[in-house]
Amino acid sequence: MLRLAVLLSGSGRTLDNFQTRIMNGTLNARIEVVLSNVADALGLTKARNYGYPAFHAKDSAAINNILKSYPIDCVCLAGYLKLYEPPAALRKNVLNIHPSLIPAFCGDGFYGMRVHRAVKARGVKVSGCTVHFANEVYDEGPIVVQKCVAITDRDSPEDIAARVFAAECEAYPEAINLVDARGIDYFWK
């Protein structure tokens, strides 16, 4: 069972998904701590309501200082909108979810609705999400799981976002379970 730190910047929808799946036994993980770079993030309130230690930490140094107090196997970026720089001991242990099929529509500046607007503007017929290990460059670490969603000409960026988020809710827990089963080093070949 993986012991997780969850980093978020917003509403905590991915945290909600993790909590639901932990409670129903389909996510083989335990959340040890939740951190946000945004002091009033709704996700921090949700974390506290779930009973998790939850802290505002303005940058990587502050996050890493807090993480020293918790037994963490994996850091999960869950809508965390800054580049996170982990301590050396967790350098390979940071998972991220991205709302496109990497290598498309990714990199610095591509997040959230920016991705879905770009997908719509380009007219692609398939989008999706990617769970990958994070490194020092946005969206370049080893890929763990990808899920595809079909796009129609009638879909708005909001339609695409909703469909991709539904795929994310399946992909991220699947990826965490794969990492738990195979080990982190398996993906860093």
Image: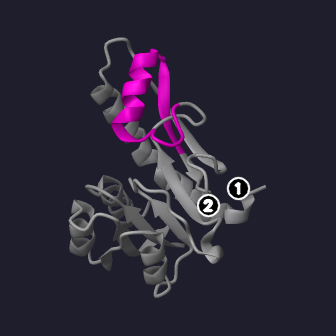
**Residue at label 1?**
187
Name the foreground residue: 123 vs 47. 123
Q: In the shown orientation, is residue 125 left or right of residue 90?
A: left
Q: Which residues are magenta?
A: 105-130
Residue 115 x, y percent position in the rendering: 42, 33
Q: Is residue 13 visible?
A: yes
Residue 53 locus on image (x, y percent) = 32, 80
- For the residue pair 107 and 133, the one nearer the viewer reads as 107
Amino acid carrying label 2: it is Val
Classify 61 as above or below 180. below
Residue 118 lies within the magenta run = yes
Relative to 23, does residue 33 appear above or below in the rendering? Answer: below
Label drawn at residue 179: 2
Tell whether label 2 touches label 1 (CB within 8 Å).
yes
Amino acid at pointer 1: Phe
Q: In the displayed image of the protein, which residue is found farthest to the right? A: 189
User: Quarter of the image containing the N terminus?
Assistant: bottom right
Image x and y of residue 24, in percent: 36, 62
Total tally of numbered discs in the picture: 2
| Nearer to me, 131 or 115 | 115
Residue 24: in sight, yes or no? no
N-terminal of the two: label 1 or label 2? 2
Q: Tell me the quadrant of the picture where the C terminus can be found.
A: bottom right
